[in-house]
Amino acid sequence: MAKIIVFDSGFGSLSIIRPIQKTMKSDIVYFADQKNFPYGKKSKSQLSKIITKTIRLLEEKFDPDLIVMGSNTPSLLVSINKKNVVKVLPPIKKAAKISMTGNVAILTTNTVVKSKTLTEYVRKNRLPKHINLTKIDATKLVRLVEHGKFLEDKKLCEKIVSKVLFEVFSRTNIDVAILSSTHLPFLLPFLKKQFPNITFVDPGKEVAQKVKKIVGRKQSKTNTMKIFTSSDPKKFQKHLVRLGIKKSVSVLC
């Protein structure tokens, strides 16, 4: 039996859980740390304290085989030296490989855009010289997901997506965009509709394959999921129901 915990500051973990459970059978604990939303506006120091405390809590409470840090921001900014912790990092090599123009965008949070850590991560990946990487602050798009607007206000989503991305995509001739926030895959219908000629790269499948490789033969017989939040369980549950997830939500803090 594979007991896996996936956590982030809200909805984002679902974009990681879905590909994991398509790839392998697993017992998943999904922890939405909504009390600390948004991770993307926290300082590196603040994030380090939050993530360290959260991982300790989850290990003590559930004794998992594996913990997936289902958020790009702490995955990039927080150093965690634990073999049982998997990070979600932007697949920039994959994006560079499939780009025809050499112009690649990375949609991420404000904290990551401003950080030296992302620059260092790009340098370590040694992209081809012809690749131009444009960093875009997608914080407003992350909010659309976390506040449930992608479920209830399509016109607003279309407006904000266009406002955040249209000018920069056009100016820089982007043909591949990396979704470097696990919230952003929920906006794919809007992104693909407005930008049909751009390929959007989601790290979910790569993370799922990594998890499967680590867990190996400890797969479960069926997929199960228990859901916890650090904030209002009833409010969170209402949003989950609209996504077709009819499970109870408990408080964990």
Image (cartoon, rainbow, N blue to C red):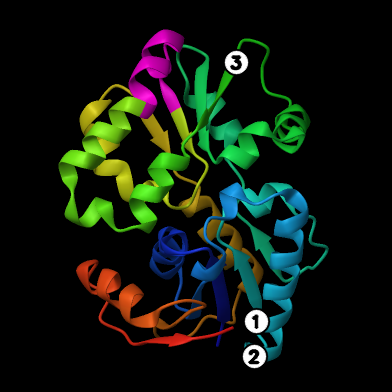
Which residue carries the number 2 mark?
Answer: 61
Q: Is 203 part of what is drawn in magenta?
A: no
Is the Cβ of the residue at disc 3 closer than 8 Å to that at disc 2? no
x then y, percent, for residue 72: 59, 50
Q: Residue at x 66, y 62 (%)?
A: 86
Distance from Cα at disc 3 to Cα at disc 1: 39 Å
- Please indicate whether residue 216 sits to the left or right of residue 242 in the image: right
Is residue 221 visible in this depiction of the protein?
no
Residue 131 numbered tag: 3
Which residue carries the number 1 mark?
Answer: 58
Quarter holding residue 125 = top right
Q: Which amino acid, by three-letter code, is at mark 2?
A: Lys
Is the Cβ of the residue at disc 1 closer than 8 Å to that at disc 2? yes
- The prevailing secondary structure element of the residues shown in magenta is helix
x then y, percent, for residue 93: 61, 32
- Span shown in magenta: 164-176
Q: Which amino acid, by three-letter code, is at mark 1?
A: Leu
Sequence order check: which comes first, mark 3 or mark 2?
Answer: 2
Q: Residue at x 34, y 48 (%)?
A: 144
Which of these two is toward me, 191 or 164? 164
Q: Which amino acid, by three-letter code, is at mark 3?
A: Ile
Q: Secondary structure at mark 3?
A: loop
Vertical arrangement, residue 181 with respect to residue 104, above or below = below
Please tell me how many numbered marks the rendered image carries: 3
